[in-house]
Amino acid sequence: MDNLLDQQHNGYTKAVTRDFFKNVYAYMFLALAISGGIAYYVGSSEEIFASYFFNEAGKISPVFYVVMFAPLGVSLLIQSAYRRLSMVALTALFILYSALIGLMLSTIFMVYSTQSIAVTFFVTAGAFAGMAILGFTTKTDLTKMGSLLYMAFIGIFIACIVNLFMKSDQLDYIISFIGVFVFTGLTAFWMQKLKNVSQDPMLDGVEKQKLSLVGGLTLYILFINLFLMLLRFTGGSRD
């Protein structure tokens, strides 16, 4: 009898976890589709790109600065206020964030060839999938590793700001090299964390749905950052 109850409980837990991650990956793939579509549409045409980011005098337009800095504010709002916001508001912010990132990513089409961007995307997908599976299946607690990786992430963020002024190619490659390890490690950490969230019996349906959106956003951000770090190494210059 006890074995039967354990089997039923395990089956229920697996079903709940599976449904939760279906939603997580649905949000992640939705964000990738929105960003990828916008990035390609804007970045594949110099005329369209210029219409967004330059004014009639040929100087950088205010849209450029909005695209560069607004996504950080939107993502922080989603992650900090998701409990207070409705699903409609969260979804709208999520779509807005994906669109802004798509505009930001359009700039890579001005630097790298379309072929190298496509190859890097698939390399990123492979690395991301491998670390996601590792994070989901490992029995090792990754909490301490996650804390260390976030400290490294803060260091990378500061180094990126410093390099805006230094414009050092060597520092740029060092940042990218460390960033690949940081974002792959954080992928495993967050997969384990989301697995624990999916199995929490204290969460109700609405909150779990909101957390699936936040989880999809987090994995999407990690994927994009890993993609950009790898692109520094694998991206071929645009002809």
Image (spheres, grey):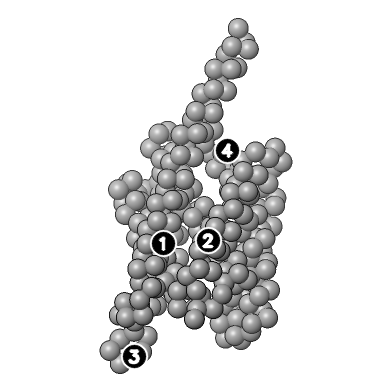
Q: Position of residue 210 (x, y in %)?
A: 41, 44
Q: How many residues crowd mark 3 within 10 Å: few (<14), some (14–19), many (20+)?
A: few
Residue tagged 1: 36
Q: Residue 221: where, in percent of width, then height?
A: 50, 58
Identified by mark 3, the residue type is Gly
- The mark lying in front, picked from 2 and 4, is 2
Give the spatial CA distance, label 4 vs label 1.
30 Å
Judging depth in this view, the residue of 84 and 180 nearest the camera is 180
Residue sitting at the far bottom: 57
Q: Earlier in the sequence, mark 1 or mark 3?
A: 1
Whether residues under marks 2 and 4 lie with C-beta atoms below 8 angstroms apart, the answer is: no
Q: How many marks?
A: 4
**Position of the N terminus by quadrant:** top right
Q: Which residue is mark 3?
A: 58
The residue type indicated by label 1 comes to Gly
Q: Is residue 155 above or below residue 86?
A: below
| Residue 121 numbered mark, or none | 2
Q: Amino acid at mark 2?
A: Phe
Mark 1 or mark 3, whichever is nearer to me = 1
Q: Which mark is residue 196?
A: 4
Secondary structure under badge 3?
loop
Q: Is residue 152 left or right of residue 38?
A: right
